[in-house]
Image (tube, helix red, strand yellow):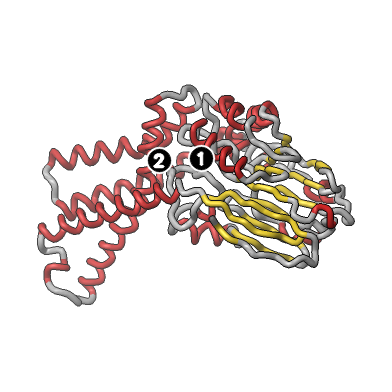
């Protein structure tokens, strides 16, 4: 199926579901608040504009980056999260009313007989949603540093304490532009790592100003270089364009290849499989890449999605670093994410091999997080047999 056809189908399905949810919210508001005809029309028009605003903002961002696009993207993205929580709470209130009709368990007031009560309920739910949204906006801006130590098989004594910083899922775009990217770069540089690795989704969907990110990225500092792999969003944005920008910034992009660092540390990087599933590219040959592994030397694999860890561990890779899921980003999407990707954010172990899944630093869609704060990951590699200090966030 051609790329544009699959995208059109996906876009149509998402827009239909999003529009259907807004129709339910509109009818819920009219049924409970009984607004005037004039107010109903205004609310209906606002809901229609909100439904089309997010895809419109995405389209406009591909052609120009200006104040209008920024504010349209900001408002429509925040509303995506607010409408989710409004839908959940509205549906919950309707279920309570249905249960009351079947099993009367409260005074007549709860049955929805009082217009004052119903309007008060709408106001309380709306206020609650705004409070949730405000907290989620704040949590998305609270970038933390997760620090941990990992015993890496084959690490020689002279490399004990070798450090790296993993940054994942920045999603550079309209809402994460050079100002925010510069702050992330500053936080990375403060950690003074031996190596910096970017495990995919450095960019969001394609935006007109994407080349501008090269300037802050050139300020990334580490003793042994900066390495990256592609994520699914690099393909949505145009993988050749994204890779060219990274290379211009001095970042080594590992596309199904291996780099050998001083001390014998093998750093392997594999392309995200999205390039095969949705863009028609050949599937990344992970087996071929793993066959290049020298089992006697320490090794780290950069793989955007937290998948195929069993195969990776069986091959003898000491550490796999992944991201992609954002930890679900928002409740209750967190539970859906865990069903799709059972290897949740944090550390996992199979034999002598480890996988660390990062929650990432950025966001997709709503610039908000709830229950899954953003993180940079600082890892100290230790020679097997050393005493570890454990992990912590700060």
Q: Which residue is mark 2?
A: 77
Looking at the picture, tell me which residue is in the foreground, 5 or 327. Answer: 327
Query: Crowdedness of circle 1 by 10 Å Cα count: few (<14), some, many (20+)?
Result: few
- Does residue 293 appear left or right of residue 323 in this picture? right
Query: Looking at the picture, how far across and down is residue 341, in whole percent?
Result: 59, 58
Taking depth in this image into account, of 121 and 316 the one nearest to the observer is 316
Residue 312: tell me if it is visible.
Answer: no
Question: Which quadrant of the figure has residue 90?
Answer: bottom left
- Looking at marks 1 and 2 on the same chain, the residue that comes earlier in the sequence is marked by 1
- Which residue is pictured at 81% across the width and 52% down the height? 159
Q: Quadrant location of residue 314?
A: bottom right
Tell whether label 2 touches label 1 (CB within 8 Å). Answer: no
Q: From the viewer's perspective, is 123 left or right of 201?
A: left
Residue 308 rendering spot, x and y as whole percentages: 71, 56
Label 1 secondary element: helix
The front one of 30 and 214 is: 214
Q: Secondary structure at mark 2?
A: helix
Tell me which residue sits at (46%, 42%) in the image. Answer: 365
Residue depicted at x 58% and y 55%: 146
Question: Label 1 belongs to which residue?
Answer: 9
């Amino acid at each position: 199926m051609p790329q544009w056809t699959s995208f059109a189908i996906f876009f149509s399905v998402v827009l239909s579901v999003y529009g259907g949810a807004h129709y339910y919210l509109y009818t819920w508001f009219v049924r409970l608040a009984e607004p005037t005809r004039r107010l109903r029309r205004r609310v209906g028009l606002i809901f229609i504009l909100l439904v089309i605003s997010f895809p419109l903002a995405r389209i406009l961002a591909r052609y120009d980056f200006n104040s209008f696009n920024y504010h349209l993207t900001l408002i429509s993205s925040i509303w995506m999260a607010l409408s989710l929580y409004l839908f959940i709470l509205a549906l919950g209130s309707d279920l309570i009313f249905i249960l009351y009709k079947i099993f009367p368990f409260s005074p007549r007031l709860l049955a929805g007989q009082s217009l004052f009560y119903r309007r008060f309920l709408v106001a309380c739910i709306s206020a609650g949603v705004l409070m949730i949204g405000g907290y989620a906006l704040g949590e998305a801006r609270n970038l933390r540093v997760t620090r941990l130590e990992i015993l890496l098989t084959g690490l020689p004594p002279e490399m004990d304490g070798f450090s790296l910083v993993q940054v994942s899922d920045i999603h550079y775009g309209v809402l994460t532009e050079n100002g925010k990217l510069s702050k992330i770069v500053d936080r990375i540089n403060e950690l003074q790592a031996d190596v910096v690795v970017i495990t995919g989704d450095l960019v969001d969907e394609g935006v007109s100003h994407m080349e501008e990110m090269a300037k802050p990225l050139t300020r990334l500092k580490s003793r042994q270089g900066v390495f990256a792999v592609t994520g699914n969003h690099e393909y949505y944005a145009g993988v050749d364009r994204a890779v060219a920008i990274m290379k211009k910034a001095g970042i080594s992009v590992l596309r199904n290849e291996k780099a050998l660092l001083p001390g014998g540390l093998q750093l392997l990087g594999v392309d995200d499989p999205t390039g095969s599933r949705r863009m028609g590219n050949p599937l990344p040959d992970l087996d071929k890449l793993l066959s290049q592994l020298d089992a006697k030397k320490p090794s780290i694999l950069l793989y955007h999605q937290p998948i195929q860890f069993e195969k990776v561990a069986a091959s003898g890779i000491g550490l796999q670093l992944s991201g992609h899921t954002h930890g679900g980003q928002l409740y209750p999407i967190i539970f859906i994410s865990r069903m799709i990707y059972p290897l949740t954010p944090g550390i996992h172990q199979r034999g002598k091999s480890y996988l660390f899944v990062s929650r990432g630093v950025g966001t997709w869609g709503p610039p908000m997080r709830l229950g899954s704060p953003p993180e940079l990951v600082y890892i100290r590699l230790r020679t097997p047999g050393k005493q570890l200090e454990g992990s912590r966030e700060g």
